[in-house]
Image (tube, rainbow, N blue to C red):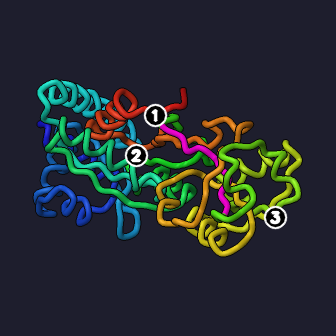
Amino acid sequence: MNLPQLYYFRKLAEVQHYTEAAKALYITQPSLSDSIASLEKELGVSLFQKKGRNIQLTKYGKEFYQYVSESLGILEHGISLIKEKSGHISGSIDIGCIPTLLGDFLPEALELYHEKNPLATINIYHGMSIEVAQGVSSGKYDIGFCSMVDDMPDLVFVPITYQELIAIVQNNHPLADRGAMYLSDLNGYRLTTYRDTIPIGKVVYKLLKKKGVEAVYSYDDEISIAGRISNSSKVAIVADTPFLRQFSNLSKVRLLDVPKDTRMIYMVYSSKNFITSAVEAFANFMVAHCLNMPE
């Protein structure tokens, strides 16, 4: 038994298809089959059994997989710690992220990370919070950055940054010169904001309901909201994100009775999925060096 055999076994157990596992491992299918057969012979048990065109773990395979995953995880963690100290962390990390972090927070964090870990490869994919959370849960993404998403018990949400909720109006609107105001000051104005079926919309809905302020919940993102406000006399509640910079005819008004951390952004990972040493090192770095919480 050798280390490559254990890595081959782990990958095959996860993919459950010889051809796909061989491709992922960059070896030939016969080489993979011979390696697994040799491993089974040494252990004296069958680790896999056929299931249609695919394969699945036997009861012995399932038990062995737990030991192998734990052992390789410990080994990779140790390798990661040593590489982190020497500045040579490598590996690929797939990150799902909401678009509003792609204009400032995440690029700045990644630039700082690459300065310390130039060998790491990071792939960025964007989507709405629910899409990101589902991608992390399914294993499509190693880690995600999004709003809190309910009813996904396998996900762990770590507060990482925030986006302040503000009001926006046209520059010639009566509220444009206020600078700051309370939510109650919006009574009597036509108010619009996010759809109340998406995470940030639910946050705003609860906030406005508590304050007795009525609004129309219609939009999915800041661009849609700002685009509407830039051509109307309405007021909008929106997160202060880089998307607003392109609208030169809008004024921002702070909301004095809305805590800055009302709209929290989380780093999220799945407790049910295997986390590589590269992903763990990246997550630790983000918490240690890029945490951005309100004072």
Instruction: Indicate whether 263 appears above or below 281.
Output: below
Q: As drawn, is 237 to the left or to the right of 224?
A: right
How packed mark 2 is, by other alpha carbons closer than 10 Å (few <14, some 14-19, many 20 or more), is: some
Query: For numbered disc 1, what is the local secondary structure?
Result: loop
Marker disc for residue 292: 1
- The residue where tag 3 is placed is 190
Q: Say whether residue 131 is visible.
A: yes
Q: CA distance from mark 3 to mark 1?
A: 33 Å
Residue type (three-letter) at the residue carrying disc 1: Asn
Give the mark, 3 or 2, whose residue is nearer the N terminus: 2
Residue type (three-letter) at the residue carrying disc 3: Arg
Q: Are marks 2 and 1 in contact (CB under 8 Å)?
A: yes
211, 59: nearer the viewer? 211
Give the mark, 3 or 1, whose residue is nearer the N terminus: 3
Give the mark, 2 or 1, whose residue is nearer the N terminus: 2
Query: For numbered disc 2, what is the local secondary structure?
Result: helix
267, 289: nearer the viewer? 289
Quarter holding the C terminus? Answer: top right
Give the residues in magenta.
161-169
Q: Position of residue 67 (x, y in %)?
A: 32, 31
Residue type (three-letter) at the residue carrying disc 2: Phe
Q: Position of residue 91 (x, y in %)?
A: 20, 45
Quarter holding the N terminus? Answer: top left
- The residue where tag 2 is placed is 105
Q: Residue at x 58, y 41 (%)?
A: 264
Q: Residue at x 65, y 72 (%)?
A: 228
